[in-house]
Image (spheres, rainbow, N blue to C red):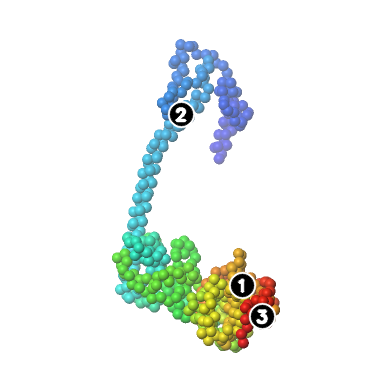
Amino acid sequence: MGLRVCFAFSALPYITANYGHNWNTTVKPRDRTNSGKNVKKNGAWPKEELDGVIQVYLLLSHKNTTKAPPNFFSDGTADGTAAQLMRSLNQRRLKRILHIICPLMFVGCVCAVIRHFKLEKLNNLALTDLVSTVTSQCLHRGIPIFVIEPVVLRSWLAISESKLPCVLCSAGNILSLGVFEADWEKKGSLIPDLNDHYIILNEWTSPDPRLLSFERLSVPSIPTHYLIHQLGNVRPLIHLVVFYKRADNFLWHSSLEPSSTTVLNLTFGQSAGAYDRFSLRGIFVDGMWLHLPHTVEHFLVQISKAEFIECDYERGQKYLRHNHQATSTMTQYGTQVMLQVTKVLDDLGIQFWLSSGTCLGWYRQCGFIAHTTDIDIEIPIQEYSTSITPAFLKAGFKLVLVTGKPSDSYAFAVVAHIKVDVFFVYEAKTYQWYGSTDKRKGRKSKYILPKVEVCWTHFVGIRVRVPCPALPYIIASYGHNWNTPVKHWHSISSGKNVKKNGVWPKEEWDSVIQVYH
């Protein structure tokens, strides 16, 4: 910086001598003789010397036509000659450079494309070799490894329509595989043997959720994920997910560190997952024996809806430490009735989730609220079916109330030891809602809820769905004091999200308010 300043100050007298004190003002065009501040006449060349002292070269354009020479003054200067010469020289130099660079760039692009395809082919070969080595070592020990990568499973389904040269290659350079916990226990010396083949297994563990309870918050860890790759290369990569059997006969896998799933762009592990139990089907593909979930179609459908969250036992323990739970009809029969409800709706293939006080009990204390008198669930109105009520009756429930109609505020209640309120949820532009009806006065109420997704959880030993995330849903219904017990709760006067929704016309009461004794 010091040199630049010094140079600038030493150059200023020179600039001022040529262009004056207004050197910072642009002047176009410029006649060097008439505009220069330091120009003095210096005589004229003798005419007989002009050919020697003034040499003008004609420049050819791209059309091979000569340009007219510039106009000369008597002192031998020319207007714009130097600038024209420089522009012409620069253009010719640029053309020469482009003539050299363009072919080189073309050759470079061709080489890059060829190199890309060669690397892709090498990666594909490396992936299949890695998978073949790992799976053969596992099969030797009676451990079936199954494919869970969605793109590969879809490729397998399409193989009958178009013969793919390499099914596994559709995964790119990261392939997700699965293994059952019971089979993985047979691994024995598998990891050292794979190390002998220069294959590295990076293991991730997490606390075993099957052992969590209010009495036991600290539990041993179990292996949940493995990242498998060749020594010295992180690509290609196998992501091996361990599936564990949970109570209520479903399969579970844990989440993985967010940094790993984001950086590596893994398909599984962004959240824990819950799946219906499945068997395996052996196939011969890409020159090796592998296994697929049976059925592939059902497994693919579950992937996008598999997110699972555990109940927070630590939060529940803190709540119950200050709020004793007495024995009640709910604590005695709640689990049995919840299991019946789940079976009825699962058999019909109808999605439902915990609602209102039942959802609050799960979130706050990982169980039923002892002083509540009913179980609350919600069903999307899109899944309404006339077969739902008969299915409950067939399972031993008694119908006690039906209000509203499928187009507006539909709900019903059944009883088997405990009343079960079933609300149907409607979608608005910015929220979702369910309705209720005052059976004495025909008044309608609307319960406003935030739009949320649903995910799986484990509640009183049963796999059920809950709003996800649950806290905004809880706050909408019970306010920010949701952690304070309220034993005398009225759904209309106590609720934080209740809005009036008009009154049913009296001529409709017989159809929209049906009370059964």
Image position, residue 63 (x, y; %): 42, 27
**Observer-nearest residue: 192 or 451?**
451
Residue drawn at point x = 48 percent, y = 30 percent: 87
- The residue type indicated by label 1 comes to Asp
In this view, the mark in front (2 or 3): 3
Q: Label 2: few (<14), some or many (≥20) within 10 Å? A: some
Quadrant occupied by the C terminus: bottom right
Q: What element carries label 3?
A: loop
Q: Earlier in the sequence, mark 1 or mark 2?
A: 2
- N-terminal-most mark, 1 or 3: 1
Give the CA distance from mark 2 to mark 3: 94 Å
Of labels 1 and 2, the one closer to you: 1
Does dot 2 land on a helix, a strand or a loop?
helix
Mark 2 or 3 closer to N-term? Answer: 2
* Residue under the image location 52 percent in, 74 percent down: 351
Q: In which quarter of the image is the N terminus?
A: top right
Q: Where is residue 391 in the image (x, y as percent from the top left)?
A: 51, 81
Q: What residue type is labelled 3?
A: Lys
Disc 1: which residue:
408
What is the number of the mark on residue 88?
2
Q: Where is residue 467 in the image (x, y as percent from the top left)?
A: 56, 72
Instruction: Identify the secondary structure beneath mark 1.
Output: strand
Q: Which residue is drawn at 53% across and 79% down?
A: 388
- Disc marking residue 439: 3
Q: Residues within 10 Å of mark 1 (few under 14, many from 20)?
A: some
